[in-house]
Every structure is written in C-alpha cells, then in structure tokens.
Image (tube, helix red, strand yellow):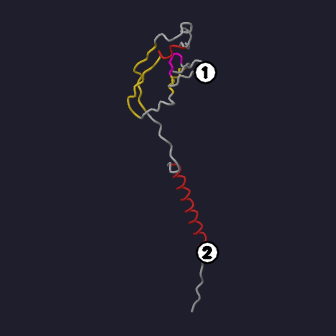
Amino acid sequence: MKHMAKKDDAVSPVVGVMLMLVVTIIIAAVVSGFAGGLAGGTGKAPQASLVANEIVVNEAYDTNTINNMAPNPVADKAADIYVIFEHMGGDGINLNNIEIHLGSLKYAHEKTLISNSKTPNNDPGHYWE
C-alpha cells in the first residue's frame, strides 16, 4: 500500500483571502446602510405656498422718524400695521413659533421681523407684531 502525502500548503492563504473578502463585504454593507439612511432619518422640511394679499398701514409711523431708514411704529397703533397672508397650498404651518422677515431691495441690510407675539424685540430696527 502506498502512503499518500497530504499537502495543505495552499489552505492557509485561501482561508485568509476568504476572510478578508467577507470582512470587506460586511464593511461595505454597513457604510451603505448609513449612507442610505438606515441608521436614522431626517425629517422633511415643511413646504407651503403663501401670498401676501393685503398690507395695511393706517398712519402708524411716528412722523419724526418717517424720513429715517427704519421708522419706528407708534406704540399705541401697532395693531394698525398688518399684512394678511393667504395659505395657497402645501403643508400646514404652525403659528406658535413663526417668524417672517421682511425687507426691500433698496435697503437690503434692514429687516422687519413679524411674529405672532406682542412682545417687543430688543434689537434696533426690528418690530414685533
């Protein structure tokens, strides 16, 4: 009976290559899962279409500051300045924390802040309504 010699010289490199291939596939799957949003999603920002239908100003500016770039509203007539926005479509809008920043092209550095609060803003040049 002949004695056959076993040779396992190639087994170790093949097992090593297979292990590296499996580890590479697992790492690629984890990276792909995170990149695809599997680990957690972000909320979609609400989108709505608004139109300013009516802007009412009933002599609510102080005549001493009307020629300045940022006239100050008269304190007792703040309710006489208002803008009516119409919700034309899209997502609903939560009015509890809404802020609308209005400005003009001529005086782009000046802004008017409108919110649903009657508390005055401490920043100069801003009004709350």
* Region in magenta: 102-107
Mark found first going from the N terminus, 1 or 2: 2
Cβ–Cβ under 8 Å for marks 1 and 2: no
Who's the residue at 52% across and 48% down the image?
40
- Rendering coords of residue 91 (x, y %): 42, 35
Who's the residue at 41% across and 18% down the image?
54
Q: Amino acid at mark 2?
A: Asp
Relative depth, front residue between 94 and 36: 94
Q: Which mark is residue 123?
A: 1
Q: Amino acid at mark 1?
A: Asp
Residue designated by label 2: 9
- Rendering coords of residue 117 (x, y %): 52, 25
Q: Assign the magenta stretch its main secondary structure.
A: loop
Vertical placement of residue 27 versus 124, above or below:
below
> Is 105 included in the stretch rendered in magenta?
yes
* Residue furthest out toward the top: 64
